[in-house]
Image: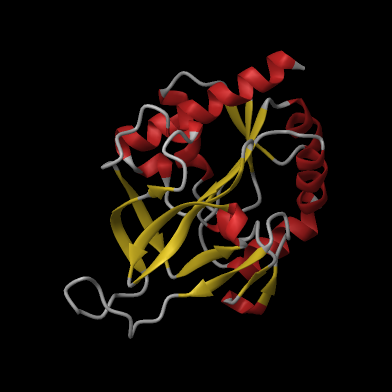
Amino acid sequence: MLAILDYKAGNQTSVLRALSALGIDCEITADPQRIAEAKGLIFPGVGAAGQAMGELESSGLDRVLAQQIAAGKPLLGICVGCQIMLDYCQENDTQTLGIVPGECRLFNSSWTDEDGVPIRVPHMGWNRVQLSDPAERLFAGIEPEAEFYFVHSYYPAPADQFVLGKTTYGIEFCSFHGREGLWAVQFHPEKSGRPGLKLLENFAAYCKETADAQ
């Protein structure tokens, strides 16, 4: 079973539907026992960083999450979940989880696209991810030209050694960060059609392999 963390930050249901369509056993939960029993965790989210952190801290899920990561439980952060895995977010001037070193920054609407046109903030639309390692297992079976759905005003800027993939929107920004077994994507795989579903399928397969090896 994969646990989708329920911390009142939206889009848990869309993640549940995507995983269920793939035949992957999953549930939305804030129960520490169910989270501990899960083979892997998905840390989704939409909305504001300050509100998300408030919910995590008031529920104690911030501590549960830290314990599970320390124990080696695979995790996939999505959108706001990706952002608040870092140390700090400019949105709401928020100290975040500090799982991965770095900060989350606001797009500058004075930046321009490849045609010299000022970008729109938030960034909404379909974009590619340029991987640091083409053999990255989370993207196995996904064409390099595949595009994923983004909707965000802030972008992650982790320490260089944690940057796994980049996307261009006004600037080249990190859209995929972490390390093996601890991944975070700025885009929404659950809303990205076949490439996104394949990424979720790859994550579930990794969780099963990790659990079976223990």
Residue 122 image point, x, y percent:
37, 70
Q: Is residue 3 left or right of residue 141?
A: right
Residue 202 image point, x, y percent:
48, 27
> What residue sits 28% from the left and 76% below the top?
119
Where is 144 relative to 137, above or below? Answer: below
Colouring style: secondary structure
> What residue sits 43% from the left and 75% below the top?
107
> What residue sits 30% from the left and 54% below the top?
127
Where is 27 relative to 214, above or below? Answer: below
Q: What is the quadrant of the C terminus in the image?
A: top right
Task: Check the image and name the residue furthest to the left.
Answer: 115
Q: Quadrant of residue 17?
A: top left
> What residue sits 38% from the left and 37% below the top?
196
Q: Is residue 208 left or right of residue 169?
A: right
Residue 30 image point, x, y percent:
72, 41
Where is 189 relative to 88, above or below? Answer: above
Residue 173 image point, x, y percent:
44, 64
Give whichever of 6, 78 is nearer the camera.
78
Q: Quadrant of residue 112?
A: bottom left
Give whichever of 165, 117 is nearer the camera.
165
| Res. 57 visible in picture | yes
Q: Is residue 32 left or right of residue 199?
A: right
Q: Quadrant of residue 38?
A: top right
Q: What is the quadrant of the N terminus in the image?
A: top right
Task: Check the image and name the residue furthest to the top.
Answer: 212
- How many marks do you count on the picture? 0
| Res. 9 visible in picture | no
Where is 77 relative to 205, above or below? Answer: below
